[in-house]
Amino acid sequence: MSQQPDLKRLKPYGDHFEDGGVQLSFTLPVPYSDEAKEAARLYAEKMGLDRVQVSSMEKMGEKFCFFVVYGFSKLTIDFEKVVVPKIEIPKLTHKEIEELAEKKLGRRVVVIGGTTGSDAHTVGIDAILSIKGLAGDKGLESYSSFEVHNLRAQVDNKVLVEKATQLKAEAILVSQLVTQQDQHLTNLKELLKLLKQAKSDALRIVGGPRMTHKIAKEIGFDAGFGAGTRPSEVASFIVHELMRRKHGSPKKGHHLSPSGEAPKDRLEGGSAGASSKKGRSLFGWIGGGRKDS
Ligand code: B12
């Protein structure tokens, strides 16, 4: 019979079920030597690991050493108490988004985006905005419901806010890939400050491989999208959020619970899940379930 994990006291699976076995890697700024290896082992022990083995030590230039260590942790986590904020809206098809935007918003939505601060990584924001999109999921430029302005790389926050104000943008999309020393957080907070000064009520959306919806909400953004985000997920979010602002939330019961396991037909902060007809028809805004106010 297969073993069942104790979800109240969840532990990693290393060599055996619930033995707490973990592997981690790190670099020490000392030359390759026996002392460096022992220092790595002791350091992992200090982190609380038992029976530590240094399974790999590699020279990184003359002054650094890279380690992979293996050990066993006594720590447990209560899996039932783990809560991850998710974007709770149905994933719609290209056609459905267009239909919804036309019927319920009745206007083209001006969207502006780019990578800001010193960040020069444009592939991610281009995948979301440009017509080519990602993996067959076309970008926002392919929708007649959106007027897209892609400012591309290293956009100054001030310029972004000025342009957004001038164009009356309803959604601002920022990409951040460089997260070293939390420079993305500093940059994003500065952007929010400028948007507040400009009294902008545009949707604030941020994305990048190390971004989550939780982090984005904590900083003050409306949504955060991570690795593997599809443009249609972002388009769905923009249209739904603007509709929510215009018409209020959908009827009670049309949203599933925000806590607990996310249904597969909902967006999960940028990670892809399957769309289902059942989930979509449950939603008040589709199929005439909600009347315009
Ligand atoms: C290509 C690349 C570059 C190219 C960029 C070319 C270009 N025009 O974009 C070049 C060579 C220029 C480059 C330079 C640098 N890079 Co670089 N680069 C990468 C690399 C290999 C791939 C990034 C990429 O294109 N991914 C593909 C796209 C499709 O995926 P994505 O960006 O994650 O986007 C998806 C989602 O995240 C999301 N998304 C992203 N943005 C947004 C925005 C919104 C609004 C939404 C809704 C969603 C969304 O949707 C996208 C589609 O699914 C990454 C490593 C990696 N695997 O991520 C390093 C990486 C990002 N680079 C890194 C670094 C350090 C640098 C340099 C500082 C290196 C140096 N010392 O010079 C410079 C920085 C230059 C600068 N000023 O920014 C580090 C960043 C580390 C960190 N966490 O801070 C990484 C992680 C590499 C590493 N492991 O060290 N880089």
Image (cartoon, rainbow, N blue to C red):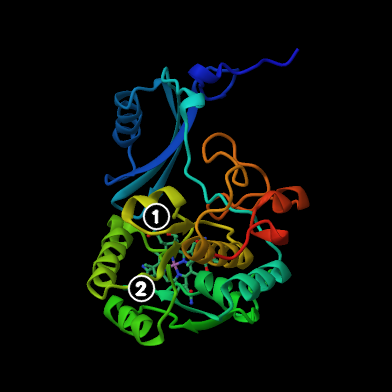
Does residue 120 appear left or right of residue 289 in this picture? left
Can you say whether 227 is above or below 149 in the image?
A: above
Residue 221 appears at what percent x and percent y? 38, 59
Q: Name the secondary structure under disc 2.
A: loop
Does residue 41 appear left or right of residue 194 in this picture? right
Q: Which residue is found at the position 44% from the left and 36% from the top?
A: 24
**Residue type marked 1:** Ala
Residue 122 appears at what percent x and percent y? 48, 75
Structural crowding at the residue carrying mark 2, measured as other residues with C-alpha within 10 Å and reported as few (<14), some (14–19) or many (≥20): many
The residue that label 1 is drawn on is 216
The residue that label 2 is drawn on is 116
Which of the numbered marks, if any, corresponds to residue 53?
none
Can you say whether 278 is above or below 167 in the image?
A: above
Question: Quick one: label 2 or label 1, which is nearer the N terminus?
Answer: 2
State which quarter of the image contains the C terminus.
Answer: bottom right
**Residue type marked 2:** Thr
Q: Residue 132, located in which quarter of the rendered image?
A: bottom right
Q: Residue 181, located in which quarter of the rendered image?
A: bottom left
How far is the residue under mark 2 from the one under mark 1? Answer: 15 Å
Structural crowding at the residue carrying mark 1, measured as other residues with C-alpha within 10 Å and reported as few (<14), some (14–19) or many (≥20): many
Beta carbon at label 1 within 8 Å of ligand 1: no
Q: Name the secondary structure under disc 1.
A: helix
Q: Is residue 196 visible?
A: yes
Can you say whether 2 is above or below 190 in the image?
A: above
Beta carbon at label 2 within 8 Å of ligand 1: no
Does residue 253 appear left or right of residue 82 in this picture? right
- Tell me the mark number nearer the camera, choosing from 2 and 1: 1
Q: Residue furthest bottom?
A: 166
As rendered, which of 279 and 86 lies closer to the eye?
279
Residue 85 appears at what percent x and percent y? 47, 44
Q: Which residue is found at the position 55% from the left and 55% from the top?
A: 270
Residue 273 appears at what percent x and percent y? 67, 50
